[in-house]
Image (spheres, coloured by chain):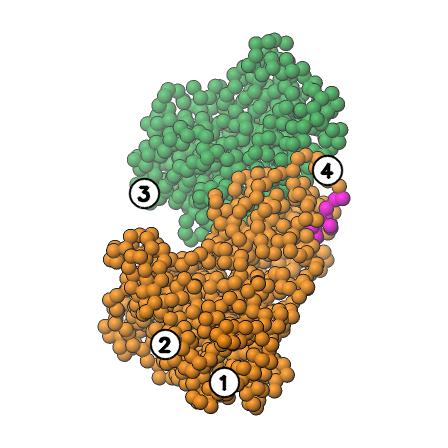
Amino acid sequence: MEIEIDGKVANVPDGSTIMDAAQQLGTYIPHFCYHKKLSIAASCRMCLVQVEKAPKPLPACATPVTNGMKVFTHSDLAIKAQKGVMEFLLINHPLDCPICDQGGECQLQDLAVGYGDGNSRFQEDKRVVFLKEVGPLISMQEMARCIHCTRCVRFGQEIAGIMELGVANRNMHSEIMTFVGRSIDSELSGNMIDLCPVGALTSKPFRYSARSWELSRRKSISPHDSIGANLSVQIKNNRVMRVLPRENDDVNECWISDKDRFSYEALNSPVRLTRPMVRVDGVLQEVEWNVALDYVAHALKDIAAKDGGSSIASLASPHSTLEELYLLQKLTRALGSGSVDFRPRRCDFSNDGKLAGIPWLGMRLSEIKELDAVLVVGSFLRKDHPLFAQRLRQVAKKCGKISLLSVVQDDPLIKLHAGISVRPDELPIILASVVKAAAQLKNEAVPAGLENVVPCEASQAIAKSLFVGERSAIFLGNVAEQSPYAASLHALTMELARLTNAKFGFIGEAANSAGGYLAKATPTALNANEMFAQPQKAYILLGVEPELDCHNPQQAVDSLKSAALVVVLTSFSDLAARDYADVLLPIAAYTETSGTFINTEGRVQSFNGISRPIGETRPAWKVLRVLGNLLDQSGFDYESSEDVRSEMLSPGEGFVIGLNNSLRRAAWSLPEVASGLQRIADVPIYFTDPLVRRASALQKTNDASMPMARMSALTFEATGVTEGAKVRLKQGNGEVVLISKVDDTVPVGCVRVAAAHPSTAALGEMYGSINVERA
Amino acid sequence: MAILGAINPMLSLGLDGDNAWRLADYVNRGGYSALRRILEGKIAQGDVINEVKKSVLRGRGGAGFPTGLKWSFMPRSFPGDKYVVCNSDEGEPGTFKDRDILRYNPHAVIEGMIIAGYAMGASRGYNYIHGEVWEVYQRFEEALAEARSACMLGNNILNSDFDFDLFAHHGYGAYICGEETALLESIEGKKGQPRFKPPFPASFGLYGKPTTINNTETFASIPYIINLGGEAYLEAGKANNGGTKLFSVSGHVNRPGNYEIPLGTPFATLLDMAGGMRGGRKLKACIPGGSSAPVLPAAAIMDCTMDYDSISKAGSMLGSGAVIVMDETTCMVRALERLAFFYFEESCGQCTPCREGTNWLYKVIHRIENGKGRQEDLDLLGSVTTNIMGRTICALGDAASMPVQSFVKHFRDEFAYHIEHKKCLVPVDVQRAGSGFFTATI
């Protein structure tokens, strides 16, 4: 299709709109309701342009290109139409730019300069719109500013998968609101603030704290989930004021999750640890850096000399940077120990020796949209991976078949082809039944060990869907990785992928779940579970809070309490670890240090420190480097984090080499289904890591509410507990009391009790057996 | 009796007695013979459409688009469902003909829709009935049940291999749902808001399938066209304006009501049929086609014949045939204020010019009526209407603007008097006398 816009000729594919063609030509057509990632509303009418032979101006966003079309965006007719629309948009707008948070970055303000008149002909009373209270993240205080572009409404329907905002009423009384009294709870809700072209939806935490022109914009990478969303961090006076998405269509498109967006509040929180602390006479006291580091170096040397280096274990958070993970393992190994790990939430490590390469997504994120069928195994999909779920949602919209095989029936807000939820110990069996169904469909011999498995209707439907299209994929989620049957699930998935010719991979637990393997932060001696099951003399903890981050916090804390030395590198002072830590070393948060995250597709994303470390905190890679020096180890002479990185990656390497999900000698076993109650532990979205746990606005959301003991009505009946009553939950030698709740999305015989929360930290394994009794 | 008078009637012929709406009565009047002839004679789909084309039946809902042509836009070889939808969401102020058709001759609509379904290869139909005439909806459901039990609906209609089923659907009274794409949204269970066109319903209509939407009266005319033959139907009216049409006459006449007359009948004849001007007062103005049609002053309308072309030539629209008659006691500012309020209220609020513009228009006219007008207001009204017209998603913006433009154009002096003297040119007691609710005489 050939089209001429203002004399410039473009060739566009059939079905393109005038707006598409104009963007190709770099011609700007003013607009409000149009957004490239949302459906066309054609309602703001700002993009009216003149089209040759059309008697009326036509909206560029919705008018399909016809061959030979001639468009004029600046003709008298077009300009008159655009100015007319601008006048209409402004008559009921409060024009309160001087006190509006959007001032300086407002599309209406910008376009009003070009298309608005100096004086208003509107002499009547303006519309009054009452404020709405919709939760701690989004402010709907000044809804009179709304121009009804409905971007927020369409975002909810199309991207977030849930229509939390809608247009109520009609005519001039139309207003954007939630269903009566409801709050906005989507984990992607903050994007509506970005989408709003005016100051109607604004960020509550950021409100009135800075003007957009006072902020300097710096590039960064999200330290939270495994997508590695690209961020634009905005800073004023060395303080992070807000975080916005930085567009990268291959990674986060133009979205970020609320976790990525609002976790910055923790960076400025009063509970940041700003000075090193050392336990003196049983009490943690602030000391100078050199004192603290000397203390650590001497203590480690002593233990290595007395008990052997192998009695030292190191555990890092998978949210640490590549450089930090690398130096931690290098230091630990230099001390003579192979007990280093970065996967505190795992418990089944039996595949560790069989990995053919670095486990990863198995494909690029940008390839997801081309998939015809997807099976996700073991995931709290929407809360664990908001942006990944969003990509799958788009696949489902285009008639891709998405199936979910997990332990609860949480609504992923994706139209599912099939959804199965089973007890955690049944997960391998149900996956095996899909494998068997696939083998039968392919007329292959039933894989060994699956002879007695009987595929149900749903698992047959799943197997079938994986054969239908050309491109299918199987993804293992956090539940699959953290389950006691992780190795079998991995092996079964590999077999299913072989049978169906699908790609398979791991969605990834955290920002550096792939990077940790590259950094060799994997054990050659004791793994994250064994290092606590067999108490060690000394522990070095990097960015982990064992009571919240470990698979079995009870076991971890017991071992830490009995250790001779516990060194904690942390950004925060309000740690439970103050009970047993001997040294607290304040380390910089992600905005204050340079580093690298390898996202789940193996993408290398390095970033710079963009604000000065708060107080006396230091980047962790520098702390580990100095410790290496103080321990008289060679090879710790790095000048920069780039020096560290270059030991793992060659410069300019965009994707990590050696990504491979295959297992050598793959084997699975199908567990006997236990008789007692089982725990299902989700990691609530706003408790996943130390940063987000201290982000004050996020902590006020419904997703951050107090964990409850959730059971199905049948389970309540079986345990004899009254619905809604307080219950005592026991695992090992620990117990907690929680309020119970009927939740029929939980399989019978299971109790859903969240991990990663102080109220459940006394419990044991995430997926172990559990006792419930009346409190 | 529903129809107060007629000249050469078709639709309203023989509608006497309480049971005229029943299937038996309709069959006695020759009902369902057209359908029977088509199905038994295995008349080709294209021939049916051609017959409709020959009749020059123009859409009775307001736009006057040739029905046969519209039917021929439906993709013939489309695989899967196609729909015919009847627009009985009669909400235009002044219009009340579809209500009476459904009330007294519902089977004509049903038969017309079945024939339409046959001609366009659709197997499903919906009749969207205005939400404020509940008893009409109930009666239509009864009529559907009658038709279904007589094998006129369902599978193998009249033992042919043609399947068609028809469902009644009622709205809740929003004017905008009479806009065809808003109507489709409403049937789909969504908020009644017009869609952007293209794509047009003939390619992407109800549930995304090819759909043809016609007015109630249009469908009701189809059996008569098939029975009479297209040419005879055309001759019943006037060239390019086939057939007879129902006119809803309201306002300052002695016998307001529905009248069926051949298109091309002089306005004066229609006025006479409606009993002439109430109290023998002088005609001041007339809105010939429902409230969204431009108003015509007495002299202009008295020269018109009631057909699409003549009214259009005079500067207005035949629209849905709602003739609103105003005598000399009418305050034109007040009349326009009421109309502007209607369009402001009924704007769906989706697109900017209509949402903001209709409200602005109402506020200004309201001010003028209440003695707070400004000299520049009349030009402002003109400018605001031009900024609305042609820039909205649907025609409601135009519908709101045309009355304003025409009232100000034809009665500018009266508006200016209002602004200057802060009162009406027509004294209040005269206005009250003319309203008919007060006994005072002029």
Q: Which badge, 4 or 2, is on the more N-terminal residue?
A: 4
Query: Mark 1 is on which residue type?
Result: Leu
Q: Disc 2 designates what residue?
A: A348
| Quadrant in which the C terminus of chain B is drawn | top right
Marks 2 and 3 in Cβ contact (< 8 Å): no
According to the picture, the residue beneath numbered tag 1 turns out to be A300
At a point 52% along the width and 63% down the height, the residue shown is A694
Q: Which of A524 and B416 is in front in this view?
A: A524
In three-dimensional space, the C-alpha distance between marks 4 and 2, rounded to whole angstroms, equals 72 Å
Residue kind at label 3, given as amino acid type: Asn
Asked if both marks, 2 and 1, belong to the same chain, the answer given is yes
Region rendered in magenta: A109-118
Q: Counting other residues with Cα less than 10 Å from the Cα at mark 3, is it few (<14), some (14-19), or many (20 or more)?
A: few
Q: Nearer the viewer, mark 2 or mark 3?
A: 2
Which residue is label 4 attached to? A121
Asked if residue B169 shows in the view, the reply is yes
How far apart in space, not on screen, are marks 1 and 4 (Cα)? 78 Å
* Residue behind mark 3: B156
* Secondary structure mainly formed by the magenta segment: helix
Query: A258 left or right of A122?
Result: left
Letter of the chain that mark 4 sits on in the rendering = A
